Image: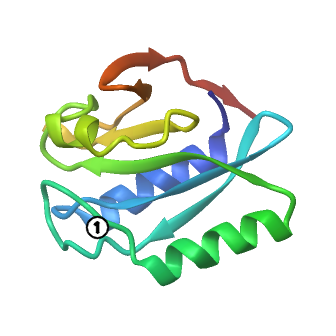
Amino acid sequence: MKITRGVLSQIIAHARKEAPLEACGYLAREDGIVHRHYALTNMDHSAEHFSFDPQEQFAALKDARASGYELCAVYHSHPASPARPSAEDIKLAYDPTISYVIISLAGGKEDVQSYKIVNAVVEHEKIEIMD
């Protein structure tokens, strides 16, 4: 996954702002590079799981399409656990075409990792930061 440094900073800031609850949202790309994020409301208001607000979800999809972007990833934070998919994350990973980006804030350090999850099989995906 290729992502701009600015978007990476914005999703980390979103994770910090929502802590101790999980932050969540979409990433959108153009020409293979993530240039935009959509911070969504965690309707679960939980530190251990999230669900999107359906109206915000639809608005993000509509805006991305109108702007020529493709939604390519779901991101969420793990305020107190590592940046790897939980059992629930794996179970709820329904779309094999997108990436799942996790921002860990455990131990006061930021760790951002990306994964492809297909049929409950998790594969780490390299993140390349673009300036």
Residue at point 85%, 66% (across, down): 67
Task: Give the residue at the far bottom of this rendering.
Answer: 55
Around disc 1, counting alpha carbons within 10 Å, would you say few (fewer than 14), some (14 to 19), or many (20 or more)? some
The kind of residue tagged 1 is Glu
Percent of width and height locating residue 43: 27, 76
Where, by quadrant of the figure, is residue 112 drawn?
top left
Compare residues 35 and 99 and report the one nearer the observer.
99
Q: Where the N terminus falls, by quadrant?
A: top right
Task: Report how many numbered discs are placed on residues in the image.
Answer: 1
In this picture, residue 130 sits left or right of residue 54: right
- The scheme the figure's colours follow is rainbow
Question: In the figure, 74 relative to 37: above or below?
Answer: above
Residue at point 49%, 67% (across, down): 39
Percent of width and height locating residue 25: 46, 60
Where, by quadrant of the figure, is residue 17 drawn?
bottom left
Question: In the figure, 102 relative to 51: above or below?
Answer: above
Residue at point 47%, 49% (across, down): 74
Compare residues 93 and 27 and report the one nearer the observer.
93
In this picture, residue 127 sits left or right of residue 130: left
Residue at point 84%, 70% (across, down): 66
Compare residues 105 and 62 and report the one nearer the observer.
62
Q: Where the C terminus falls, by quadrant?
A: top right
Q: Which residue is mark 1?
A: 18
